Image (cartoon, helix red, strand yellow):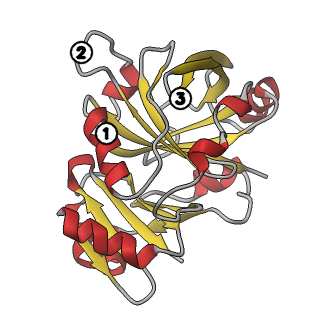
């Protein structure tokens, strides 16, 4: 059974603004990480998974091709694994094309003090097999440096991610990967149905081909998150059982539910 590890929002060369935006929305954003692959990131950490804001240094001196060639906004779906070699073999046996296990790291700091290097081993599906975004599998070699209590409590009360919404994406290849553990869902929409479901905030999401479009976040303070976002100038809609917030700068729609 597949377990969510994290979702990825591609911020390209605008990671500073992304960090500020998510802090304005009441998230605790972990300090910036610098991957040995060349990318930079911030993690918004929950109990056993997280939301990653990934990008590249604004000076343009370091380029990670898969970031540059991927669209702005929700871009990555990552599942947790224990054995990279086993998942690599099982993907090949199922007819998928995957990259061999790759290990990389990033230094971790807390209040300016180094804690060590967070290390990961990933297996990635090669592009073109699943519509919508990048799919890969991650083993945490040092989970204690990622899932830290200092970063798991959020002023907006957020406790986790419960859905990734996909537009014009065929479900079948994703289903072939395996069943996803309860608590997180992939939700498939036609563009017309997506507009119906998400109302006026959907207009801020680029009408490009098959894509990842919206992320659902669980928080008991969903109403106040929407109200604060509206005051901050983000397109927002507070409804009976949810708040919708569009982030046009990052081609992302967030849904907050109880």
What is the secondary structure assignment of the residue under circle 1?
loop
The residue to which callout 3 is attached is 126
Q: Is residue 143 visible?
A: yes
Q: Given the current orientation, which residue lies at the most extreme bottom position?
A: 240
For residue 128, say whether it is visible: no
Q: CA distance from mark 1 to mark 3?
A: 16 Å
- Decide which of 55, 175 is in the foreground and name it: 55
User: Residue lying farthest left?
Assistant: 233
- Residue at screen point 28% across, 34% down: 16
**Tag nearer the camera, 1 or 2:** 2
Mark 1 or mark 3: which is in front? 1
Q: Please state if 178 lies on the left or on the right of 75 as rendered.
A: right
Position of residue 37 measured from the top left corner of the image (x, y, whole percent): 48, 14
In the rendered image of this protein, does residue 172 appear above or below residue 60? below
Residue 85 vs residue 215, the one in the foreground: 215
In the displayed structure image, the side of residue 182 where residue 223 appears, left or right: left
Give the CA distance from mark 3 to mark 2: 25 Å
Left or right of residue 96, residue 178 in this image: right
Label 3: state its secondary structure.
Answer: loop
Residue on which the image places disc 2: 60
Q: CA distance from mark 1 to mark 2?
A: 17 Å
Which residue is found at the position 73% from the left and 39% from the top? 94
Secondary structure beneath label 2: loop
Mark 1 — residue? Answer: 71
**Quarter in which the C terminus is drawn:** bottom right
Q: Position of residue 255 (x, y in %)?
A: 41, 68
* Above-or-below relation of 229 to 33: below
Q: Earlier in the sequence, mark 1 or mark 3?
A: 1
Q: Position of residue 63 (x, y in %)?
A: 33, 15
């Amino acid at each position: 059974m597949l377990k969510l590890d994290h979702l990825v929002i591609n911020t390209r060369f605008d990671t500073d603004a992304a960090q500020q935006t998510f802090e304005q929305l009441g998230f605790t954003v972990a300090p910036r990480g610098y991957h040995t692959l060349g990318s930079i990131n911030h993690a918004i950490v929950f109990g056993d998974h997280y939301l990653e804001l990934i990008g590249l240094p604004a000076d343009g001196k370091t380029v990670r091709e898969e970031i540059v060639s991927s669209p702005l906004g929700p871009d990555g779906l990552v599942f947790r694994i224990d054995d990279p070699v086993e998942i690599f073999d099982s993907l090949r046996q199922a007819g998928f094309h995957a990259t061999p296990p790759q290990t990389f790291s990033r230094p971790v700091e807390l209040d300016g003090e180094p804690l060590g290097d967070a290390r990961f081993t990933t297996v990635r599906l090669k592009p073109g097999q699943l519509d919508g975004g990048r799919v890969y599998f991650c083993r945490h070699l040092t989970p204690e440096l990622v899932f830290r209590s200092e970063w798991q409590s959020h002023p907006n009360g957020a406790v986790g991610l419960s859905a990734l919404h996909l537009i014009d994406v065929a479900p079948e290849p994703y289903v072939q990967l395996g069943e996803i553990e309860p608590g997180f869902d992939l939700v498939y929409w036609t563009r017309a149905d997506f507009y119906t479901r998400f109302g006026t905030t959907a207009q801020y999401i680029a009408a490009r081909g098959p894509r990842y479009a919206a992320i659902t976040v669980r928080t008991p303070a969903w109403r106040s998150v929407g109200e604060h976002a509206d005051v901050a100038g983000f397109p927002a809609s507070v409804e009976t059982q949810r708040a919708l917030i569009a982030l046009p700068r990052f081609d992302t729609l967030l849904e907050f539910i109880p």
